[in-house]
Image (cartoon, grey):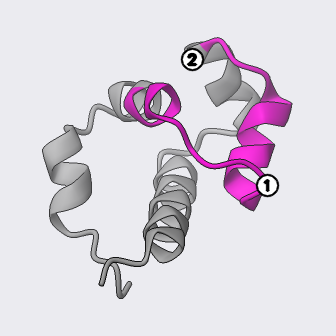
Amino acid sequence: MLNFDKLFDNIRVKLINIRCEKNFSQTELSKLINISQQRISYYESGRKKIDLFFLLSCLHVYNISIYDFFKNLQESE
């Protein structure tokens, strides 16, 4: 059975890792996708669930397709 909490956690961690690999601060990313740095902090800390707008906006900035993002993402990661 799919564990959605684990899936959301894997998405959250993967987005944090990509942001760091691309050398973006939360503040820089917030300006590029037009949301507050505090909101990014909430997403990254797990205080809020990542929404589709945030996910797609980040992937656009990082130049990563949604297919490539999810193809190696597994519930067990």
User: Quick one: which residue is furthest to the right in this view?
Assistant: 38
Task: Report helix, strand or loop for mark 1.
Answer: loop
Residue extending furthest toward the front: 1
At 58% from the left edge and 16% from the top edge, which residue is drawn? 32
Range of residues picked out in magenta: 34-56
* Placement of the N terminus among the 4 image quadrants: bottom left
Residue type at mark 1?
Answer: Arg
Residue 23's place in the image compared with 44, above or below, is: above
Asked which quadrant contains residue 28, the reply is top right
Q: Nearer the viewer, residue 15 or 20?
A: 15
Q: Is residue 2 left or right of residue 61?
A: left
Quick one: 7 or 39, which is closer to the camera? 7
Q: Quadrant of residue 7?
A: bottom left
Mark 2, other Cα within 10 Å: few <14 / some 14–19 / many ≥20: some
| Label placed on residue 47 | 1
Residue 33 marker? 2
**Residue sitting at x 79%, y 22%:** 36
Residue 76 image position (x, y, % from top left): 35, 88
Tell me: residue 20, above or below residue 75. Answer: above
How far across and how far down the image is residue 56, in percent?
Answer: 38, 29
Please provide percent x and percent y for residue 11.
Answer: 45, 60
Q: Position of residue 49 (x, y in %)?
A: 62, 49
Total marks drawn?
A: 2
Q: Is residue 52 shown in magenta?
A: yes
Q: Amino acid at mark 2?
A: Ile
Relative vertical location of residue 54 with respect to residue 6 in this rendering, above or below: above
Q: Is residue 32 found left or right of 66 in the rendered image?
A: right
Find the distance from the CA under tag 1 to the CA under tag 2.
Answer: 19 Å
